[in-house]
Image (spheres, rainbow, N blue to C red):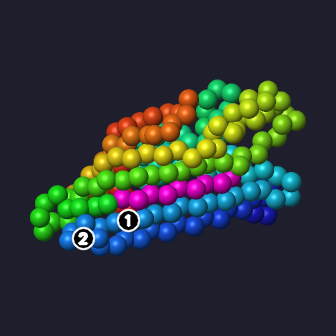
Amino acid sequence: LPFGDLAYYKLQYINQSFWPVYGDFVLMLRADLGYGDGYNNKPLPFFKAFYAGGVGSVRGYEAGSLGPRDIYGNTLGGQRKIVGNAELFYPLIKGDKSVRGSVFVDAGQISGLTIACEDTPELCATYNSSLKQSEKFRYSYGVGLAWNSPVGPLKFSYGVPFKERRGDLIQNFQFQVGSVF
């Protein structure tokens, strides 16, 4: 903008596809890829970083909890986002597709954060030592329930992380109100 000094860009690609598998069973595959960075020697602003974890991302982990952390354990987000979901839906009531159960497998990674080391050397040391661990993919599996209710869409899931790392924030039961996908 002409009156600001932020200089960054973000690219994001989301693809969600559905295929009938057998009878009323439907397979959904979803990919969410993102990349952002600053230009003119400026970093990506922290409030524009990518986050993952939670419903609509990698279930079983707290919302926005994947990726690099600061010295206090707060999630910093990142420049790159890779999230993939595979979910098999089936109607729970014969002939009514407004209530569907599902089984799922999720995977995701947030990485590539750059921070100004000259201003915060202690943050850089902690960040660089934990970066390798935080950039690994996280995985989960579980079951879900989606209901297109009269008050709006509701989605419940119970996710179980596997190959989690020390310090990961786990949240097995999660729900979402208001978004179908």
Q: Looking at the picture, does residue 24 appear above or below residue 155?
A: below
| Dominant SS type (magenta) | strand
* Quadrant, the C terminus: bottom left
Instruction: Return the disc, 2 or 1, that comes first in the chain's sequence.
Output: 2
> Is residue 163 among what the camera can see?
yes
Q: Position of residue 94 (x, y in %)?
A: 11, 64
Mark 1 Cα within 10 Å, few/some/many (few <14, many 20+)?
some
Q: Amino acid at mark 1?
A: Met
Determine whether, in the image, residue 124 is placed left or right of residue 111: right
Q: Magenta part of the protein: which range?
A: 77-87
* Residue at left offset 37%, top offset 43%: 159
Q: Which residue is mark 2?
A: 22
* Residue at left offset 66%, top offset 54%: 80
Q: Looking at the picture, does residue 161 appear above or below residue 79?
A: above
Q: Secondary structure at mark 2?
A: strand
> Is residue 77 among what the camera can see?
no
